[in-house]
């Protein structure tokens, strides 16, 4: 058992049981995949039938050990419950269990993925576990302990296997690479360990791919290139750009990931892990991840300058993007839309009117440069170009109509949300400023919401609905905060609207992120080409 890494709490109990001659007739090993359940079960079976060993380790030389190593031991029966889950297989096992071992002391039955057995098969297995012959030992393994009936659990000694820590994986990988006499950077080992998700089997499999390079020294770049994964330095830079609401820089990193052939889903998962660690450190001063010293140093500095609620909101957005990837036309599309929603949908801080006017002027005067290639999200944005600057009608202020609209604004909002639940956040952010002639002017801090309402497909139904409520024709125009200052629009007056929107939020949460983003951005999913 010395060859097994980790799971010391399990090995200690099993070794004591062997030493004291108190081996149980049934064990239940539970834990994540690749954590050593089946490996330890086989080693235990090998030791129990070893003919020469007096300690806790099998000798490896006796006929029983040799037969075990060659998978020719007749006293070890392995059953994959995922493909042999019916009652007939368990009945056959029950019929044979009375037969004495062929040459060893015990007949050991290893049942992998035992949670896959049918109810009838579990009942048949229960009868066997209740009255087992003295020469039979069962070792059941499962990744989903909650699916194993309590009646089965109560007749087994249960051991919970833990995921390996990054450091444990590094130690294991370093030991293997040294045995292969291949030099590999610790940064490369750490990258493999991070992408193994606590699974020894996955870590060893990835290392096997890397070691096939057969170079004098394997670096972190070799691992990134061969396995198509991304280091946490890139992930950290990506999160930093998102926190600064820099959409261009964020999309650039994402495009580099795609061009490198790395998994966007894996990149999103890593970004989620990093952000989770950042939020945890922001609140408690600790986190459960293991990063390089440089990454860790930057993380701690970020945590001191970020508000927890912002980190949580961004974390939820990334989780939604990840869940959308399964059905997306392009794997990267949900993350691209999430970037645009986060960076373009809100401004990180309010600018002064002078700064805003300057920014608008610079933006308008800057030459437009067309990208040589467009991402799916950029193509969708291009289908709905930014509208022309808002102009003010010369008609007089219509205070009477404005007051009438204010009095019926709650009804208008309620009916708007029923018409399209995805307009909830948009209409909450657009505040009535004034009425000129028969034109209602709304002001919003968010340019994305302005573009959404000013889209004819959204604005026309809203104008029809408002006209129906106030019983006269009205036009709707939306101004950004900077435009409102330029046009001299009065500041919006607060209108008390009852907080009855939890039901509407529940409706929105049932909508997919892609539906919501497309509703905001306009357009439709199109095939690349």
Image (cartoon, rainbow, N blue to C red):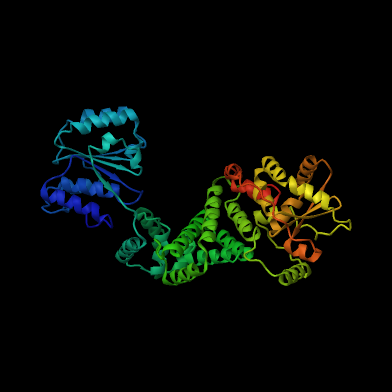
Q: Is residue 321 above or below residue 109?
A: below
Question: Is 273 located above or below residue 411 in the figure?
Answer: below
Q: Nearer the viewer, residue 306 or 63?
A: 306
Residue at left offset 63%, top offset 66%? 349
Provide residue 144's location: percent of width, then percent of height: 36, 42
Viewer-side residue, 438 vs 144:
438
Q: In this view, does 196 lie to the left or right of 439?
A: left
Res. 341 image quadrant: bottom right
Q: Which of 59 and 326 is in front in this view?
A: 326
Q: Where is residue 332 in the image (x, y as percent from the top left)?
A: 58, 54
Observer able to see residue 220: yes
Q: Nearer the viewer, residue 502 or 332?
A: 502
Count the marks: how many? 0
- Give me the residue at 65% from left, 46% from top: 422
At x 33% / y 36%, what residue is drawn? 81
In the rendered view, tell whether residue 366 sits above or below residue 396: below
């Amino acid at each position: 058992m010395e060859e097994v890494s980790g799971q010391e709490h399990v090995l200690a109990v099993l070794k004591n049981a062997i030493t004291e001659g108190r081996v149980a007739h049934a064990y239940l090993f539970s834990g994540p995949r690749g954590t050593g359940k089946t490996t330890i079960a086989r080693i235990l079976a090998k030791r129990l039938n070893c003919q020469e060993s007096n300690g806790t380790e099998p000798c490896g030389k006796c006929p029983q050990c040799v037969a075990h190593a060659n998978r020719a031991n007749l006293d070890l029966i392995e059953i994959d419950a995922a493909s042999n889950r019916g009652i007939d297989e368990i009945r056959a096992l029950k019929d044979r269990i009375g037969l004495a071992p062929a040459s060893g002391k015990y007949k050991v039955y290893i049942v992998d993925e035992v949670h896959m057995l049918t109810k009838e098969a579990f009942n048949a297995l229960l009868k066997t576990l209740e009255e087992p012959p003295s020469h039979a030992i069962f070792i059941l393994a499962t990744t989903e302990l909650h699916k194993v009936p309590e009646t089965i659990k109560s007749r087994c000694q249960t051991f919970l296997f833990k995921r390996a820590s990054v450091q444990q994986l590094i130690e294991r990988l370093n030991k293997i690479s040294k045995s292969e006499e291949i030099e590999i950077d610790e940064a490369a080992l750490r990258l493999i360990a991070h992408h193994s998700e606590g699974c020894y089997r996955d870590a060893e499999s990835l290392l096997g791919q890397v070691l096939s390079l057969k170079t004098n020294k394997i670096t972190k770049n070799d691992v990134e290139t061969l396995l198509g994964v991304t280091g946490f330095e890139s992930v950290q830079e990506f999160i930093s750009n998102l926190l600064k609401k820099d959409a261009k820089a964020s999309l650039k990193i994402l495009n580099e990931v795609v061009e490198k052939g790395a998994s966007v889903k894996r990149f999103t998962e890593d970004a989620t892990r990093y952000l989770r660690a950042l939020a945890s450190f922001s609140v408690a001063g600790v986190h459960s991840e293991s990063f390089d010293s440089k990454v860790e140093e930057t993380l701690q500095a970020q945590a001191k300058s970020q508000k927890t609620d912002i980190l949580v909101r961004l974390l939820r957005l990334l989780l939604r993007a990840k869940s959308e990837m399964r059905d997306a036309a392009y794997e990267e599309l949900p993350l691209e839309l999430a970037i645009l929603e986060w960076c373009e949908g809100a401004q990180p801080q309010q600018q002064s009117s002078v700064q805003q006017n300057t920014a608008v002027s610079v933006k308008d005067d800057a030459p437009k440069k067309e990208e040589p290639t467009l991402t799916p999200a950029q193509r969708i944005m291009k289908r709905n170009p930014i509208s022309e600057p808002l102009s003010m009608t010369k008609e007089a202020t219509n205070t009477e109509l404005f007051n009438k609209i204010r009095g019926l604004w709650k009804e208008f909002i309620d009916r708007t949300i029923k018409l399209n639940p995805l307009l909830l956040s948009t209409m909450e952010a657009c505040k009535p400023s004034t009425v000129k002639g028969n034109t209602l002017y709304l002001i919003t801090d968010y340019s994305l919401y302005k573009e959404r309402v000013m889209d004819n497909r959204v604005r026309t139904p809203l104008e029809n609905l408002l006209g129906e409520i106030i019983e006269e024709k009205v036009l709707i125009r939306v101004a950004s905060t900077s435009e409102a200052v330029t046009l001299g629009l009065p500041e919006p007056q607060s209108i008390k609207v009852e907080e009855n929107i939890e039901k509407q939020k529940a409706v929105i949460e049932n909508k997919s992120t892609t539906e919501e983003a497309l509703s905001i951005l306009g357009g439709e999913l199109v095939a690349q080409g």
